[in-house]
Every structure is written in C-alpha cells, then in structure tokens.
Image (cartoon, helix red, strand yellow):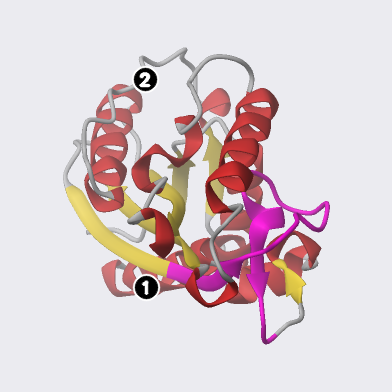
C-alpha cells in the first residue's frame, strides 16, 4: 500500500492528540483531530473488555465514518491491589456524567478512597495504552501496546498531564507522572511506547 502520511486521531481529548503528534509528527505525518475532518460522528460503543478490543472498535468505526486512515487508542490505569481496576473503565470509573474535569476529579477521589489502607509494598500500578491503525475501509493495519510502570502515591502530585497522572509515582524519577515535563513523559509513558511502536509499524507499511 502507499505510505501512510495523513492520519485522523480518533479522540476528543486534545492532550492525547498532542502527545501522539509529538512522536509521529517528526516522521512527516499529518495528524488531525476528529473536529478537523467533518462530523459530528457517532461515537462507537466501547463494548470490549480489553484495551486492545476497544482500540480496534474505535479505529474501525471512525475509519468507516470518515473514509480516512484512523489511529485510535484505548488507555487507562491498572492497579494490582484493586484486581486491575479501573482498567478499561478508567475514564468512567466513578460515573460517566459530567465534563472530563468533573469525571477526573471523581475518579481520583475514588482512587484515594480505595487505596487509603493499602500498604506501600502493595501499591504497584501502571498505565496501559493500546493503539490500532485502520485504513479508510476499516481494515486493521497495525496494533501496538505500551505500559508505564509505577505505584500509587500517598498523595497526588504535579500539574502536568491529566486524569490519574498525579497519582502514578515513579520511584526511579523521584516524581509523579504529572511532575514530568511533556518531553520527558513522552520518552517513558505508555502512550509514548505505543506510539513509537506504531511509528515503526507505519514505516514498515510504507
């Protein structure tokens, strides 16, 4: 097939678009948000119970709706002491109503409550990101996965990032995910790992 050089990122979250653009943009790839290619588009129901399944659902649905090559991701937080929760429900763990900032605040409050009595040696956690690239006909071209290991902090720290970022403590860096500068975060984050793997897949496609 011809080289992939124009990709729609299937998300309404501008932070995700920025993070992905920082990694794929230097390859000469144009990355567009859904708001740049028409619409509005019906949001597919994310019925999968894995990050991989939901990324595929979104990529295929939006590719067919837009008639363009689409990159979709599904990501979230896995906490070992909570049996892997919130997992694929990360964005709506404490309820789906309200704006993103309201949902984030409720989710973080729930995480604080659930982890309040968990000892330090049982607080391992990670962010997971799975990406799927689909062509304009909805055929899957590539899938990738990345993780960002850490542990749940005692208190949230930092103002960068979004969602659960202030809670993921990185022992080797001595800071939280939300205290990393964007460039440093892209080098080690789950989305950064998945996007760099996707960059390699796109090179092979081209």
Q: Position of residue 133 (x, y in %)?
A: 31, 51
Q: Residue furthest front?
A: 117
Q: CA distance from mark 2 to mark 1?
A: 29 Å
Name which of mark 2 and mark 1 comes first in the sequence: 2
Crowding near pointer 1: few (<14 within 10 Å), some, many (20+)?
Answer: few
Instruction: Label 2, secondary structure: give it.
Output: loop
Q: Nearer the viewer, mark 2 or mark 1?
A: 2
In magenta, the rendered stretch is: 147-172
Q: In the rendered view, does 129 fall on the left or right side of 177?
A: left
Which of the labelled discs sits on residue 203, or is there none?
Answer: 1
Q: In the rendered view, does 24 fall on the left or right side of 206?
A: right
Based on the picture, tell me whether residue 155 belongs to the magenta stretch.
yes
Whether 160 is drawn above or below 177: the answer is above
Based on the picture, tell me whether residue 15 belongs to the magenta stretch.
no
Q: Position of residue 79 (x, y in %)?
A: 44, 59
> Viewer-proximal residue, 161 or 77?
77
> Viewer-proximal residue, 166 or 137?
166
> Viewer-proximal residue, 11 or 102?
102
Q: Position of residue 12 (x, y in %)?
A: 55, 30
Q: In the rendered view, does 50 fall on the left or right side of 126?
A: left
Locate residue 3: give its quadrant. bottom left
Identify which residue is drawn at 46% across, 14% down: 39
Which of the labelled discs sits on residue 43, or is there none?
Answer: 2
Identify which residue is drawn at 25% across, 28% down: 64
Locate residue 84: give its quadrant. bottom left
């Amino acid at each position: 097939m011809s080289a992939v050089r124009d990709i729609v990122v299937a998300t309404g979250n501008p932070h995700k678009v920025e993070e992905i653009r920082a990694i794929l943009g230097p390859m000469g790839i144009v990355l567009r948000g859904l708001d740049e290619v028409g619409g509005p588009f019906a949001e597919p129901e994310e019925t999968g119970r894995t990050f991989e399944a939901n990324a595929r659902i979104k990529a295929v649905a939006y590719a067919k709706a837009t008639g363009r090559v689409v990159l979709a991701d599904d990501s979230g937080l896995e906490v070992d002491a909570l049996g892997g929760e919130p997992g694929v429900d990360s964005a709506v763990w404490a309820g789906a109503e309200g704006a993103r900032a309201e949902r984030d605040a409720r989710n973080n409050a729930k995480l604080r409550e659930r982890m309040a009595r968990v000892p330090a040696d049982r607080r391992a956690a990670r962010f997971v990101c799975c990406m799927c690239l689909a062509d304009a006909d909805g055929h899957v071209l590539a899938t990738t996965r990345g993780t960002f290991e850490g542990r749940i902090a005692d208190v949230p720290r930092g103002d960068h990032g979004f969602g659960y970022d202030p809670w993921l403590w990185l022992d080797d860096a001595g800071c939280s995910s939300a205290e990393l500068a964007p460039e440093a975060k892209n080098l080690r984050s789950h989305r950064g790992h998945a996007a760099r793997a996707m960059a390699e897949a796109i090179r092979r496609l081209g």
